[in-house]
Image (cartoon, coloured by chain):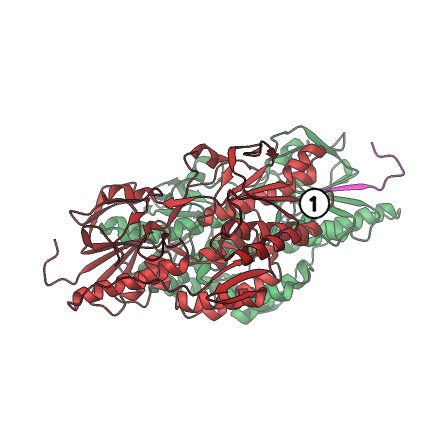
Chain colours: A green, B red
């Protein structure tokens, strides 16, 4: 129990955009902030697809949380995994991966749940062995490994059918993740790997993007969807619209059209949901297990507990829940920090309003589409501007200029170091480490 | 069998300094070179300790082999593991990690065995679970992971004894590897981690270096050993000379002095030997299983087969075998390339002479010792100069200036990205992946 002489203890679970924004938003509040994360780093997710396609290295998009929060005196970072939340008792059960103990508890006065998203397979969890998602760094490294190993194996193969299967890549899901991976993969094989391999012609790698609906990037305007489609086709990506996947096996995927696409590498960009942690809350969840939060982002019946980012379903603005994108998480993080400060100053809670500063999707290195209100841009100046804005407003740590320059450099010179296969040598097909 | 109209086929096993130098040395010869490696990259080993101490990231010291050899028209790269060599039949058995097949064979006219070194535990293989060596990238990442996790666990621990054990690091072996790791670890905890952690005082991390002989860096001159010892002590590293390890357990190490040093993290820099592949050769090996090569680096009785670098024991210069350092491997690689060219031009073989261009060891970021003939330098200008020389003469690929600048930058600004814990979240104590 908190005695009244203690400062309120704010427990933030998750060090992504949402959690970090919330923690930083409380820098000047009379609270003690504890940030928990299963990893020791913050991940810049918008560029995760770059790691998966060997354009950037993991260390270029991940920074230790305790470094980022080092100068914030009221914040501390603990590397722990939350396993259950007891809203009534205001405690969180945590597992210490080091000792294996999992019955330690951390009490709180305020809770911010920001654990992000997990890949879901619409009830077909067994597809997870063959079709890998892209939600964290180990996913990205695993995808990169499988793609590079596929080319290596094709280089050695003497069987034309096997070679064709090895050089066929299927990406499921035509949202930003799938589109960005498809574009980057097409460019990787045509412009980078084509020069490195002798026996195979990496230019003829086949990249197929499967989308269940009538258009890709359906959260963008129609004309931008069309533009993106054209740009993908310029890169020789085959886009199958109005097509669903009915089965995923180690040999390929079966489609609603009846086709079986033989492919060694299948990447899943189609489904995300909240982490299983939300099930321990006992509050209303949507079908993707996200918390149906109130207008101020708090959980129903628990004004001291908030859920933000991909963990939450905010349905009070527009006719759809807010999308699971970084700016939403960031703005919600700042909002809940303000709500907590408001409480301390005896001010009222307020409704969260998401300000859409624009959306962007890249298709390869020099193509992109963006929309900001009525303003639509394309091409890579737009992409660089968007990245710069993302960095500057997202997380204000001092070496952001260096980070931006580093990304630009790495990106444009096709840093070869990003194309190493690490962690294991010759063992593809093994499911990613958890 | 090779028909006389085919060009001679040179098979190089191993893409390290030796193998790569040999392959590149044959760029202008009328031969076809095949380079095999279990990984897809060349590793710049002198900076491996930097990755292990979170100063550099893996991608900064590793480059894909097929990129490096891309413009060499007579060379191809295959990602395969050699499992056995039949010198009489002139074939190498390879395992395809992808398909699992392990009975494929590659024929050759010339063989260059350059598979490098493996960590050995002097017959105590069981120590390998607790004491990790530093010979490849996954070792380096594993050490980094264990070190960072130890600090994370100490941050959470409420038991002072446990905390002490977690913040005690033992390094076994006072050669360049052990000394460099000890210095880098002392600096990492005092200058970098001390700022990031709250509950613990990382400055009081205890780093103990164990050396069996009377001085560290015994391949250097006495006065430099003494200087290195002093520099380590300035960093608060405890150096135990004339001390051997009699047992290594997950709780610490037992010493010949009778002491038991409680430590969670033990790093092994004490023993290396050749890979088990040499045992399939049927030629004389030394105790560390290295091939006792002839004066021209060929294997006894097989002038068409060479062994170089750490795989070989060259005993024809001085009273000790040549050390297992990069310049030896590089020069031998170039020598065997010349021997093969000589054969094609009907010239005689010649004796290999190693030209010692100097040795260097670093103790932390701003300390170093170096000797070159009579010339002795210390301090980090010497270190930068040595690195520059290493890079420029080692491997001539075009972005070496960029690489050097990148290292300098990363190194001096303590790139935070190098301090991420990747691959797994909270599972220490698991042996490194193979």
Residue at 21% in and 66% down: B341
Quarter of the figure that contains the C terminus of chain B: top left
The residue that appears at 42% across and 50% down in the rendered structure is A145
* x and y percentages locating residue A319 in the rendered image: 64, 50
Label 1 sits on residue: B204
Q: Nearer the viewer, residue A316 or A118?
A: A118
Q: Is residue B320 left or right of residue A1?
A: left
Q: Position of residue B321 (x, y in %)?
A: 36, 52
Horizontal arrangement in the rendering, residue A354 relative to residue A234 (left or right): right
Work out whether A352 lies above or below A118. below
Instruction: Determine if residue B24 is in view.
Output: yes
Instruction: Say above or below: B394 vs A91.
Output: below
Q: Reply yes or no: does residue A3 show up in magenta.
A: yes
Specify whether A343 is left or right of B110: right
Q: Give, as a single range, the part of the protein colored magenta.
A: A1-12
B198 drawn magenta: no
Q: Residue furthest left?
A: B4
Give the image location of residue A97, x and y in percent.
60, 35
Tally the marks.
Answer: 1
Q: Nearer the viewer, residue A93 or B27?
A: B27
Of residues A157 and B389, the one nearer the viewer is B389
């Amino acid at each position: 129990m908190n005695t009244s002489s203690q400062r309120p203890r704010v427990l933030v679970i998750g060090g992504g955009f949402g959690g970090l924004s919330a923690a930083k938003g409380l820098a000047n509040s009379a609270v003690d902030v504890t940030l928990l994360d299963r990893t020791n780093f913050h991940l810049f997710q918008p560029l995760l697809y770059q790691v998966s396609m060997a354009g950037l290295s993991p260390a270029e998009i991940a920074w230790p949380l305790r470094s980022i929060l080092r100068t914030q005196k009221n914040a501390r970072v603990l590397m722990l995994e939350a396993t259950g939340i007891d809203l009534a008792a205001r405690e969180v059960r945590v597992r210490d991966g080091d000792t294996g103990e999992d019955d330690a508890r951390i009490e709180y006065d305020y809770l911010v749940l920001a654990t992000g998203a997990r890949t879901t397979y619409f009830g077909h969890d067994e597809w997870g062995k063959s079709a890998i998602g892209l939600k964290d760094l180990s996913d990205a490294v695993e995808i990169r490994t499988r793609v590079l190993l596929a080319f290596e194996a094709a280089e050695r193969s003497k069987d034309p059918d096997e070679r064709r299967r090895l050089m066929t890549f299927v990406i499921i899901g035509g949202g930003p993740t799938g589109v960005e991976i498809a574009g980057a993969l097409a460019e990787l094989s045509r412009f980078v790997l084509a020069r490195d391999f002798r026996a195979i012609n990496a230019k003829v790698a086949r990249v197929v993007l499967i989308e269940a609906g009538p258009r890709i990037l359906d959260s963008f305007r129609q004309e931008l969807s069309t533009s993106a489609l054209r740009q993908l086709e310029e890169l020789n990506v085959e886009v199958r619209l109005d097509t669903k996947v009915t089965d995923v096996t180690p040999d390929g995927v079966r489609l609603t059209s009846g086709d079986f696409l033989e492919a060694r590498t299948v990447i899943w960009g189609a489904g995300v949901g909240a982490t299983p942690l939300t099930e321990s809350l006992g509050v209303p969840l949507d079908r993707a297990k996200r918390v149906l939060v109130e207008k101020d982002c708090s959980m129903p019946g628990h004004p001291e507990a908030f859920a933000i980012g991909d963990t939450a379903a905010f349905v009070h603005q527009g006719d759809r829940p807010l999308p699971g994108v970084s700016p939403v998480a960031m703005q919600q993080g700042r909002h809940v920090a303000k709500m907590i400060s408001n409480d301390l100053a005896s001010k009222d809670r307020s409704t969260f309003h998401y300000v859409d500063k624009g959306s962007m999707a890249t298709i390869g290195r020099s193509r992109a589409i963006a929309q900001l209100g009525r303003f639509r841009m394309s091409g890579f100046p737009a992409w660089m501007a968007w990245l710069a804005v993302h960095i500057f407003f997202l997380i204000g740590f001092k070496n952001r200029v260096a980070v931006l320059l580093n990304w630009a450099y790495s990106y444009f010179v096709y840093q070869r170091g990003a194309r190493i296969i690490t962690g294991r040598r010759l063992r593809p097909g093994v499911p990613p480490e958890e």
